[in-house]
Amino acid sequence: MISVLCVAAVSSSIMALASGGRDVALGSALLYGIFSLVVCFVIQQVMRRNRHHSEFIKAESAQWLMDTLLSLAVVVGFISAIFLQNTSLSWFVPYIDPIMVLLAGVYFMTVPISLIRRNGRELLHMSSDAKTDQQVKNVVTELEAMYGIKETHIRSSKVGRTLYIDFHFLLDDQSKITCVDDIDQFREQLYDRLSNVKQSKWMNVNFTKQKKVGIIKRFTELSPLSANEI
C-alpha cells in the first residue's frame, strides 16, 4: 500500500509538471489539506503509542506517518501558492503542488523498502535486531562475572512480537552454580534482568561442564528457534 501510494503520487506529479503544472482551487484545496493532515497525524500518533511493540503495527504507523508528511507537503504548497499568486512569480504557482508532492513521494519510497526488509526477516524466522542482541549480551556478561561462568553460547531469533533465545552456559569447578537452587536463582535473575527487553520472550536455558566440540555443535544444529549467534 505504501509503495502504491508513493508511485501514484510521483507519477501524478511528473505528468502535472510535464503538462504545465496543476491549477487548483487554492482555498478549498488548502482546507482539505489541513483536514487530511490533522486526521493522518492523529491516527499515526495513536498507532505509534501501541503497547504491543508489533512490527506490523509499526508498519501501519509508518504508512500513516508518510500520509501525514505528504499532506503537510501539500498544505505547504498551497500556502506558498496563495502568497505567490499576486506576485511576479505567479507563473510558478501551478508547479508548486506537483513539485512538493514529487519530492515527498520520492523521499518516502525508502519507507516500504526498509519495512519489507525488516518484516521479511521476521517472517522468514531470521535473527533479532542488533540492539536487542546487545542488551542480551550485556545481561549475560554481568551474570557471567557474578557466577563465575566460564563461557556462554547464545542464539536468538525473532518472529512477530516473540523473541526466542537459547542460552548454553559452560561451567567449571570455580563456577558458583553447584546445585538446583543455584540454577533456579540464576534463571530468576536472568529473567528479571531481561525484563527491559520489551518483546515477548521464549527462553531455553542450558548448563553443562562438558566443553566438547560435539556438544557445542549439537547445540548449534539442534536449536530450531535460533537464527543468530550473539
Image (tube, helix red, strand yellow):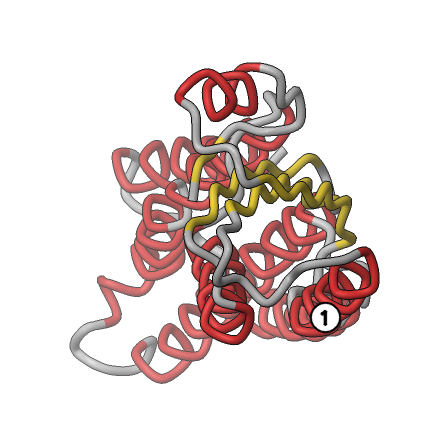
Residue 56: x and y in percent read 71, 43
Residue 39 or residue 141, whichever sits in front: 141
| View extreme (left): residue | 88
The quarter in which the N terminus is drawn is top right
Looking at the image, which residue is at 72% across and 41% down?
204
In this orientation, which residue lies closer to the viewer: 151 or 111? 151
Left or right of 223 in this view: 153:
left
180 displayed left or right of 176? right
Q: Nearer the viewer, residue 144 or 100?
A: 144
At x 45%, y 31%, the residue is 7
Q: Quadrant of the C terminus?
A: top left
Vertical placement of 79 versus 216: above or below? below
Total tally of numbered discs in the picture: 1
Q: Is residue 21 visible?
A: yes
* Image quarter of residue 13: top left
**Amino acid carrying mark 1 in the image:** Ser
Q: Is residue 82 above or below residue 62?
A: below
Quarter location, residue 49? bottom right
| Residue picked out by circle 1 | 195
- What residue lies at 68% left-to-right and 65% top-to-bottom? 190
Q: What is the quadrant of residue 38 in the picture?
A: bottom right
Q: Residue at x 45, y 72 (%)?
A: 145
Residue 78, given in percent of the width and then of the height, sits at 46, 71
> Hey, which residue is sitting farthest front in the picture?
173
x and y, in percent, of residue 41 in the image: 67, 71
- Classify 10 Å Cα crowding around label 1: few (below 14), some (14-19), many (20 and above): few
What element does badge 1 sit on? helix
The answer to whether residue 193 is above or below residue 165 is: below
Percent across and percent down for residue 146 are 53, 75
In this rendering, position of residue 223 left or right of residue 174: right
